[in-house]
Image (spheres, grey):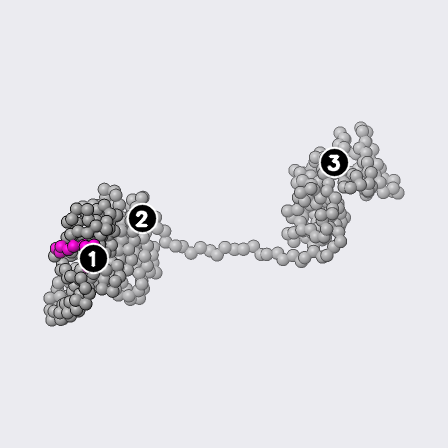
Amino acid sequence: MLSRMMKPHVQRAARPTAILALLMLIAVIGAGWANAQSGLEQIALGENKTGTLAADSPTAEYVLLLEQPTRINVSLFAITPGLAPSLRVLDGSGVELGVSVNPGTQNAVQVDGVNAPVGILRLQVSSASAQAGDFLLTVEAEAAIPPVPLPLGQIVNGQLSAAASRLVYGFTGEAAQGRWLFVQSLLTTSGPIITVTDAGTLETFVTIGARVRVTRLLLPAGAAEYLVEVAYGSAADSEAFTICLAPENDPAACPVPGVQPATPTAAPTTAPVVVLPPLPPSDVCILASSTGGSVNVRSGPNTSFSLVGQLNGSTIVNVIGRLADNSWYQIDGAGLTGWISATVARVGGPCNLVPIITPTATPTGTLLTPTGTGTGATATATATGTPPTATNTGIAPTATATNTGIAPTATNTGIAPTATPTEVPPTATLIS
């Protein structure tokens, strides 16, 4: 396949009659098309044409007839001082193949490396400075660069510079599957200009600019012949790059530095979602576990206070107090009185009516005891040097703590707290 790309003159020599007929057809069609357009002139490859841009004719257009796909360079020079010419290259249907816009200060412009198809090519000349004048237009066929065969699964190194600004590679696709094409610049600031074309028609499939360092293209399945042009695109003295071709089903065959083949990743596992039943309607503030499991009940509104028990995940209790920021709730129920963090609880009912408790004690071994004030509850605790002992009378629901030192006294001006007497003196143990 590549031999046909590198020796097109052999094919042309084998078909002189067909080519002669094609040339005659193109000439007839081109001449008729050119004659149908007023002001159009024909230009041939290797020819220099002079023309004039006038005030009443600010644009001049030329027609180039091509018998085969050709890569051409078009140059435009101002003859009249002050003329700033601009140039556009279009195919017969008006599709723009190349353009060189003059900012209004240049006296020469050019469009290089145009992959021109078989048929009619249109060259449009205009003035960017709005000044009339004479110009010189030249069209040259670019010397063909024999393509370097690109092997499958092998990294090929290349080097570009201003003096050697182009390299061309060729390969043939496969009918059963596509091809991965990798091109990577070894510079850190820019990459080469990459153009992928059909070797038979010079149809351009894709062009990648110099701002892209790594190119990864997946070409479709099919026995098409491809040309890959890698052109110098940086301001560096030289530009090194690598190019590699891999089967569609095995991109890892090209271990291009910096491009890691995609590896399958395990699907993330998600924790089972616990759906809890809603809390029942209530006229008072109620609380339950928000995790579905047991939660800690502490002697005070802080994790530094000791545990007094755990609330079962399915139990609902009443809320009798809260901190001002609702970060802790004091509960009473299920045989427990203590504090539960809002981070593990869900509440329902009119919890905004629950008294706010301002703790005045720190975890020193004494349980936080609420003291009613009529409008809320204030926790007051007095720590002693030795644990207080409880005297059980068996009758009164109030507990009087006696101590060999100074006995703590609980004063209640609102709602009197009650204590459950025990036979063993209570001892508070701190767990941090």
Which stretch is magenta?
48-61
Depth check, front residue: 19 or 130: 130
Q: Which mark is residue 57?
A: 1
Residue 429 placement, left or right of 37: right
Outermost residue, top side = 405
Quarter of the image containing the N terminus? bottom left
Say which element carries label 1: loop
The chief SS type of the magenta part is: strand
Say which element carries label 3: loop
Of the residues shown, which amino acid type is indicated by label 1?
Ser
| Circle 1 Cα neighbour tier, 10 Å, few/some/many (<14 / 14–19 / ≥20) | few
Using the rendered view, name the quadrant where residue 220 is placed: bottom left
The residue pinned by badge 2 equals 211
Quarter of the image containing the C terminus? top right
> Distance of mark 2 from mark 1, alpha carbons?
39 Å
Of the residues shown, which amino acid type is indicated by label 2?
Arg
Residue 51 magenta-highlighted? yes
Say which element carries label 2: loop
The residue pinned by badge 3 equals 366
- Residue 290 position, x and y percent, is 65, 51
Depth check, front residue: 375 or 131: 131
Using the rendered view, name the quadrant where residue 225 is placed: bottom left
> Residue at left 70%, top 45%?
329
| Circle 3 Cα neighbour tier, 10 Å, few/some/many (<14 / 14–19 / ≥20) | many
Using the rendered view, name the quadrant where residue 430 is placed: top right
Of the residues shown, which amino acid type is indicated by label 3?
Thr
Rendered position, 244 above or below 413:
below
